[in-house]
Amino acid sequence: KHDGRGRFQLFAPFMDETVKLRGQIEDELRHALSDGQGLSVHYQPEVDAQSGKVIGLEALVRWNHPVRGPLAPGEFIPIAEESGLIVPLGEWVLAQACRMAVRLPDLFVAVNVSAVQLRTGNFVERVVGIVTAAGCRPGLIELEITESVLLDEESAAAATLHRLRDLGFRVALDDFGTGYSSLSYLRQFKVDKIKIDRSFINNLGSDAEAAAIVTSVVTLGHAMGLTVTAEGVENREQMDRLSDAGCNELQGYFFTRALPEDAVVAFIAKQTNF
Ligand code: C2E
Ligand code: CA
Ligand code: CA
Ligand code: CA
């Protein structure tokens, strides 16, 4: 017989292990941040849909754990968010991104900003400090946020984003279409760019509805004066459909995965036209 208690007892030790593992990863991440060991930033190009030229990069954090090996961001970003370590981690990524923007001044560099970071009282001052110290123009830095950021603490997050835009930073709405109330947010929060979530791009070939959604988002984005980017472009068919739909920028494995700093510089130097 299966009773609820039996299952709970089976489940409890696993919960303990999970909690312990999270605590360990948190400690190890704190160490990595203090000595810089094992952390790096990889960069994935964003390509102009018409010319095929690289026009920007997205900074994506990587952690090569000394014992566990490479960990995906999904395995440690949530722990970093819960523990508050996302604040120093995000600042470290931003500092790296600024160095890259100075190294490649014709390109923008996008960084992902967590809701936890936006909620800290001095986010704007910290960002300005880091960018200034790096000798980087704010216009080269794009801050990617998700709709959930705006859900949490609507007015405070909006005010923070507006201040950053006034200072010249660009703001992009990431994973567009996966949250709710996307349309009302677009009116309420002024952004520069929307990035259509890759779930819509995946099904572009087979699914007429996905194609209709992409076309509508492009039309809407352009009507509001926004740049529209598609992420998760994996093949030529998707690329062709997206550029036909009027998408401005494309990003995905079809062009390249995120690459270490020197490899992405070499990739850009070759300037493959797609
Ligand atoms: P995201 O911001 O949506 O980043 C795009 C993710 O999609 C990246 O995964 C990228 O490698 C992957 N990707 C790019 N092109 C393709 C494609 O053609 N097909 C497929 N299947 N995937 C593609 P990654 O690097 O594992 O990052 C996962 C998530 O972790 C990011 O999603 C972002 O939410 C978060 N993240 C990464 N770096 C940072 C960071 O520095 N700070 C914060 N707060 N979050 C970060
Ligand atoms: Ca992103
Ligand atoms: Ca995204
Ligand atoms: Ca995503």
Image: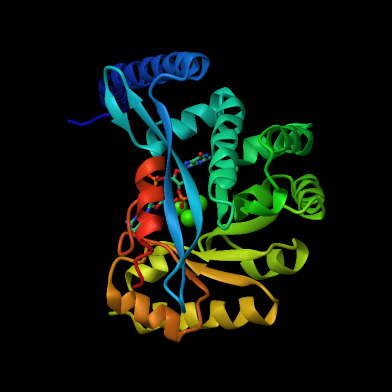
Residue 108, located in which quarter of the rendered image? bottom right
Colouring of the image: rainbow
Q: Give the residue displayed 46% in from the left and 79% down from the top.
A: 50
Query: Image point 40% across, 14% down: which residue?
Result: 24
Q: Which of the image's four quarters has the C terminus? A: bottom left
In this rendering, position of residue 155 left or right of residue 177: right
Residue lying at 64% horizontally and 52% vertically, measured from the top left: 140
**Along the viewing direction, whichever of 20 and 101 lies nearer the viewer:** 101
Q: Is residue 95 visible?
A: yes
Residue 57 location (% of width, % of height):
49, 53
- State the count of labels: 0
Please give the name of the residue rendered at 60% of the width and 59% of the height, measured from the top-left corner: 173
28 or 43: nearer the viewer: 43
**Front-most of 166 and 2?**
166
- List x then y, in percent, for residue 15: 35, 21
Res 152 quadrant in image: top right
Relative to 176, does residue 3 appear above or below in the rendering?
A: above
Q: Give the quarter of the figure containing the N terminus.
A: top left
- Residue 112 visible in this rendered orientation of the protein: no
- Above or below: residue 34 compared with residue 200: above
Q: Residue furthest front?
A: 269
